Amino acid sequence: MATKKTSIFTLTERLTISAGATDTFATIDLGSYVDVGDRQAIQVHSVDYIFQGTTGQEHVEIALASDDSVLVQLTDLNRGGLVFADDRSLVSSASLYKSTAGELNMEADQYPDNFGKGSDDGRYVVNDQLYITGRATQVNSNTAVNVTLRVNASIVSLTAKDFMAIAIQSTAADN
């Protein structure tokens, strides 16, 4: 299905959530990696989520109230908010919970996803951006929750049929 053109490399982006109950957005530009003419796509192998507080040295629990949660999703289409797990644009997601006792629990729901072709090796993306959406139920005043996404990916060349199938699937998921 795919021929690797590069070894695995890492794309990194940080999302800063400074208000509770509000979606916060960021993007990862893939325009220089995806090429329709050459049927070149990005293959996402894994996504790591790192939760930090207002500064890189501050612990995230300082920014969160008791019984607080943070949800973060990576999609290949701009949905304008958080999506359900059955949305075909969902690439990966994670959540962080803080209990009333102050204990933290993090879960990565999808790593990356297992919804389609190529799922054994990763997720193929033919769109020119990845979209990050995050939401915390509460954020303490004068603090922020920083979530860094580390996307491990490689550039692949797809057959014409496979590239077209993934592009059609992505377009159909847009509706």
Image (cartoon, rainbow, N blue to C red):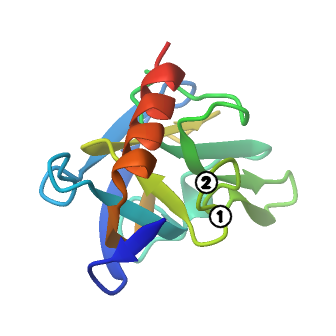
In percent of width and height, residue 161 lies at 42, 46
Relative depth, front residue between 34 and 75: 34
Q: Quadrant of residue 150?
A: bottom left
- The amino acid marked with disc number 2 is Lys
Using the rendered image of the protein, determine whether residue 144 is visible from the camera's viewpoint: no
Q: Earlier in the sequence, mark 1 or mark 2?
A: 1
In percent of width and height, residue 54 lies at 39, 59
Q: Is residue 125 left or right of residue 21?
A: left
> Which residue does the image show at 14% across and 48% down from the upper left?
37
Of tags 1 and 2, which is closer to the observer? Answer: 2
Q: Which residue is mark 1?
A: 111
* Residue 109 against residue 2 in the figure, above or below: above
- The amino acid marked with disc number 1 is Tyr
> Which residue does the image show at 31% across and 41% down from the upper left?
127
* Residue 39 against residue 121 in the figure, above or below: above
Q: Return the residue found at the far right.
A: 101
Element carrying mark 2: loop
In percent of width and height, residue 87 lies at 64, 30
Q: Which residue is mark 2?
A: 117
Give residue 6's mark.
none
> Which residue does the image show at 79% across and 61% down from the upper left?
102
Using the rendered image of the protein, determine whether residue 17 is visible from the camera's viewpoint: yes
Q: Residues within 10 Å of mark 1 (few under 14, many from 20)?
A: some
* Residue 60 against residue 175 in the figure, above or below: below
